[in-house]
Image (cartoon, rainbow, N blue to C red):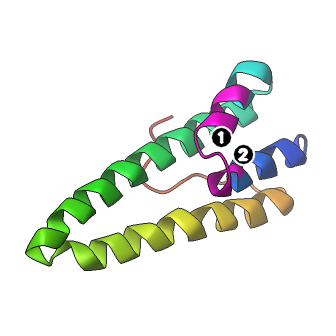
């Protein structure tokens, strides 16, 4: 249960600085698990940003509306799940990008 605070910070940063905090923690912290989590959080936010952008473009064709709703909810819910798992001392892998690292 080491670095629980840093893990929670990485997950919670999705609500106030989704790119900056994981990047800074990756550069500053020496713990391998926090580094892995920081990269996952950063990649997750990038992928979700791209998917939301594509969904917004597809709104023109009316098929993007459900995608924007789903990806928007994922961007909010997934970090909350990560916070809860970190507080419980469990390892959490982000969906979509969790196995890339």
The residue positioned 84% from the left and 56% from the top of the image is 89
Q: Quadrant of residue 65?
A: bottom left
Q: In this view, does 76 lie above or below 98?
A: below
Q: Which of marks 1 and 2 is nearer the N terminus?
A: 2
Mark 2 neighbour class, 10 Å CA radius: few under 14, some 14 to 19, many 20 or more: many
The residue positioned 64% from the left and 35% from the top of the image is 20
- Secondary-structure class at tag 2: helix
Q: How many marks?
A: 2
The residue positioned 21% from the left and 72% from the top of the image is 64
Left or right? Give the position of 90 relative to 52: right
Residue on which the image places disc 2? 10
Provide the major secondary structure of the magenta segment.
helix
Residue 51, image x, y percentages: 31, 56
Residue 90, image x, y percentages: 77, 57
Residue 46, image x, y percentages: 43, 43
Q: Which segment did they paint magenta?
A: 13-24
């Amino acid at each position: 249960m080491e670095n629980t605070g840093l893990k929670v910070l990485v997950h919670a940063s999705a609500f106030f600085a989704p790119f900056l905090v994981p990047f800074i923690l990756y550069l500053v912290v020496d713990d391998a698990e926090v580094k892995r989590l920081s990269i996952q959080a950063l990649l997750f936010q990038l992928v979700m940003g791209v998917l939301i952008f594509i969904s917004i473009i597809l709104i023109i064709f009316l098929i993007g509306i459900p995608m924007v709703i789903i990806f928007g909810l994922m961007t909010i819910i997934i970090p909350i799940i990560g916070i809860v798992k970190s507080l419980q001392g469990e390892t959490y892998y982000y969906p979509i990008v969790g196995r890339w690292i």
